[in-house]
Image: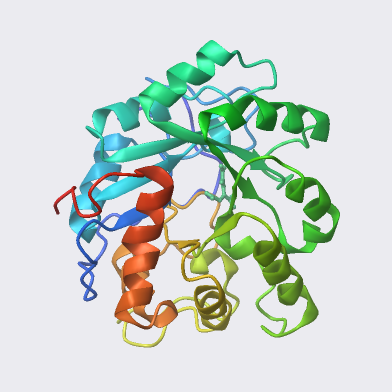
Amino acid sequence: MSSRFAPTPGWLGYHPAPSRPAFTLPAGAVDAHCHVFGPGDVFPYAPERKYTPCDAGKEQLFALRDHLGVARNVIVQATCHGADNSAMVDAVHASGGRARGIATVRPDVSDQQLRELDAAGVRGVRFNFVTRLVDAAPKDDLALIAAKIAPLGWHIVVYFEGADLPELEGFLGSLPVPLVVDHLGRPDVTRPVDGPEFARFLRFVDGHDVWVKLSCPERLTVTGPPALDGRSPAYVDVVPFARRAVREFPDRVLWGTDWPHPNLIDHMPDDGLLVDHIPEIAVTGEQQRKLLVDNPMRLYWPGEDLRGATL
Ligand code: 0GY
C-alpha cells in the first residue's frame, strides 16, 4: 500500500514471518510493551516526530499476539504519534478488552479528556527522557501531568537511558504514582551486573513503587542475537541483568515484545525467539507466571480473572 509517509531511510521493518515459539506461554500471558504505528494514511504521524516508521497497525499486532500465544497487550503510545493517541486508542478499542493503553498527554490535558482515555482503556501516561526520540519536557510540566493522573489510579511509564538515572531519580522518586521503567532501565550491559551503576538502579526500584519491564534484549545487547538457526543462546550479555531483576523483584517485573521494534539498526528480532528467551531470564515456572500473567494483570486488569482471556 502506498503511503504519504516515507519511512526514515534505513528503517528496518518488523519480522515478516516470526517463528512459532518453542516455549509455551502460560494461559493469559500479557505482552506489556508494544506499539501500533498508523497506518499513517488513517492515523497520521506527528509533525514533531523524530522518525517515520513503517506502518504497523492493529491487525498486524493482533495477528502476532495470536501467533505467539499471547492473551493480552499493553499498547504504549510511540513518540512518532506525539500526543495524538488515536491510533493507540483505536487499537485498544478494537481489542475487545484484550488491550490496555499508555498515552502521551500534554500538561494542559483536561480532566474530561483523561476520563475519556480511562474509559477507552488507558491506564497510564509515558514520560520519555530519551532525547533522540523527544525534546526534553520541563519537569514542572511532567509534575503537573502526574498530579492530574493520580486520582485515576494510573501509573507513569518512564523511558530513560541508564546513564541518566542519577540526574532523574530524585524527580522520578517524587512523583505521586507508581512508575514502570522501560527496558530494564537501559543498563550498559558491558558493565558488571554487580557494579555500582546497576546497583543504583536496583536501589531506586527497591526504594519506590517501581515496576521493571524486562523488554528489549535486542536493544540492550552487545553480543547480539542468536545465530540464524536460533539454536545458540540469545542476548547472553543481557541475561544476568534480567535474571537479577526477576530475583530481586519477582512481583514487580513485566515482559513485552516491543513490537514493531522502532529504530533498530543492525538486526530485527524474530518475535518467536524473543518468547523463547523468556525461560532464560525467568527460570522457574513461578517466576514465569508472575512475570507474564500475575504482575501485568494486577497492574492493568485488577480484579479480573487472571486467565479470563483464553488463547
Ligand atoms: C521503544 C523504544 C524506542 C522508541 C520508542 O516511542 C518510541 O518512539 O519508544 C527506541 O527507539 O528506543 O520502546 O519502542
Can you give x and y, in whole percent of width and height, for residue 285 in the image?
A: 30, 78
**What is the residue that sits farthest to the left in this orientation?**
310
Looking at the image, residue 271 lies above or below residue 238: above
> Left of 147 or right of it: where is 57?
left
> Left of 95 or right of it: where is 48?
right
State the image quarter where residue 96 is shown.
Answer: top left
Answer yes or no: is residue 55 visible.
Answer: no
**What is the residue that sits farthest to the right in this orientation?**
167
Which residue is pictured at 69% across the width and 53% down the height? 160
Can you give x and y, in whole percent of width and height, for residue 4 in the image?
A: 45, 22
Looking at the image, residue 83 lies above or below residue 219: above
Q: How is the image coloured?
A: rainbow
Which quarter of the image is occupied by the C terminus?
Answer: bottom left
In terms of depth relative to the viewer, which is nearer, 311 or 154? 154
Looking at the image, residue 3 lies above or below residue 207: above
Which residue is pictured at 71% across the width and 67% down the height? 201
Which quarter of the image is occupied by the N terminus?
Answer: top left
Which residue is pictured at 45% across the width and 53% down the height? 258
In terms of depth relative to the viewer, which is nearer, 4 or 68? 68
In terms of depth relative to the viewer, which is nearer, 250 or 41? 250
Can you give x and y, in whole percent of width and height, for residue 71 in the image?
A: 23, 51
